[in-house]
Image: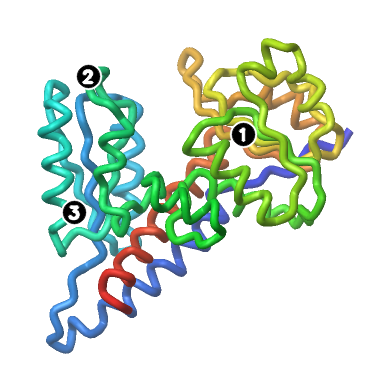
């Protein structure tokens, strides 16, 4: 049996990043002529020493440097209070030289994540997690869309599938991927099902996965979706990133699934690179909106 075609996020991301780099250069051109233009700038407010966050931020910075976006990492002690953290974010909100703000999660247990994310200015919320931006997504008036959700949409689009009426199953109902992704898919008139922990406990997960023409998995548990569950000819997008020994793997049993699907993403190299590219695109959008460009 023919193996599935890899949806290579890195290649698709490179095309988008080339476009972003060209636009940044064009926007910065007036500064050569003496006009004072601030460079698009994102600040990552990192709390504590989370190894996964450190790797992700280093990847972001490398890409940002390449396309001409200023990427600043502000490292804070894990013992900082929620109140102090929010004060720092509010200072950044008022700083006109900063155009995008992100706060990598997880945060220390004594800090309520929702309070922190809600404190980010909606104009600088380049990860699309502020209630205002999520609300606009519901109303189909998108400005900033959660990066991973948008990355998944870009990968599906690259497969050429017509989502109109397609059976799409999302495994994972999280606020950053599953829920916003369901709204983006419904905009495309896909028939969308979200599976959560109750689906698993009621033993209905196999049934839903087995009928999916497009399967998106964002659980964070290695091998939670068995390869032989996959519908033949389907498209499989694996958002999960899990460390197993010295390897990074997804949520789907890749080798078996690849023999059944028509298109599939690999972990790493699939959704991850696209997510970073979308973040850079959002920073550029924020810069232009704040500069009235």
Determine whether, in the image, residue 262 is placed left or right of residue 252: right
Secondary structure beneath label 2: loop
C-alpha separation, residue under disc 2 versus residue under disc 1: 31 Å
Q: Is residue 97 above or below residue 175?
A: below
> Along the polypeptide, which appears first: circle 1 or circle 3?
3
Residue 238: give its label.
1
C-alpha separation, residue under disc 3 versus residue under disc 2: 23 Å
Residue 211: give its label.
none
> Along the polypeptide, which appears first: circle 2 or circle 1?
2
Image position, residue 245 (x, y; %): 48, 13
Quadrant containing the C terminus is: bottom left
Q: Is residue 92 above or below residue 213?
A: below
> Residue 100 appears in which quarter of the rendering?
bottom left
Image position, residue 215 (x, y; %): 71, 36
Q: Is residue 165 above or below residue 272?
A: below
Pointers 3 and 2 in contact (C-beta within 8 Å): no
Which of pointers 1 and 3 indicates the residue nearer the eye?
3
Identify which residue, 93 or 37, lies in the foreground.
93
Q: Which residue is mark 2?
A: 110
C-alpha separation, residue under disc 1 versus residue under disc 3: 34 Å
Secondary structure beneath label 3: helix
> Along the polypeptide, which appears first: circle 3 or circle 2?
3
Q: Residues within 10 Å of mark 3 (few under 14, many from 20)?
A: many
Q: Which residue is mark 3?
A: 93
Q: Residue at x 30, y 42 (%)?
A: 118
């Amino acid at each position: 049996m023919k193996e599935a075609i890899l949806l290579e996020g890195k290649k698709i991301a490179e095309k988008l990043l080339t476009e972003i780099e060209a636009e940044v250069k064009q926007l910065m051109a007036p500064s050569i002529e003496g006009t004072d233009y601030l460079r698009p700038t994102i600040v990552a407010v990192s709390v504590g020493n989370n190894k996964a966050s450190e790797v992700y931020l280093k990847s972001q910075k490398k890409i940002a440097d390449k396309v001409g976006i200023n990427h600043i990492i502000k490292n804070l002690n894990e013992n900082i209070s929620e109140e102090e953290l929010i004060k720092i974010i509010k200072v950044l909100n008022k700083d006109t030289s900063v155009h995008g703000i992100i706060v990598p999660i997880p945060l220390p247990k004594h800090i309520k994540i929702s309070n922190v994310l809600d404190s980010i200015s909606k104009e600088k919320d380049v990860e699309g997690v502020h209630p205002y931006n999520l609300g606009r997504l519901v109303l189909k008036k998108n400005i900033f869309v959660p990066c991973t959700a948008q990355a998944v949409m870009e990968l599906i689009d690259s497969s050429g599938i017509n989502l109109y009426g397609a059976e799409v199953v999302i495994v994972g109902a999280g606020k950053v991927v599953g829920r916003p992704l369901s709204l983006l898919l419904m905009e495309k008139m896909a028939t969308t099902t979200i599976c959560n922990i109750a689906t698993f406990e009621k033993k209905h997960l196999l049934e839903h996965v087995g009928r999916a023409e497009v399967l998106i998995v964002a659980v964070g548990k290695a091998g939670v979706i068995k390869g032989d569950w996959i519908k033949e000819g389907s498209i499989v997008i694996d958002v999960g990133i899990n460390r197993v020994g010295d390897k990074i793997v997804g949520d789907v049993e890749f080798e078996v699934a690849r023999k059944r699907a028509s298109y599939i993403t690999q972990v790493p190299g699939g959704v991850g690179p696209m997510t970073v590219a979308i973040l850079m695109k959002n920073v550029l959008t924020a810069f232009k909106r704040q500069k009235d460009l």
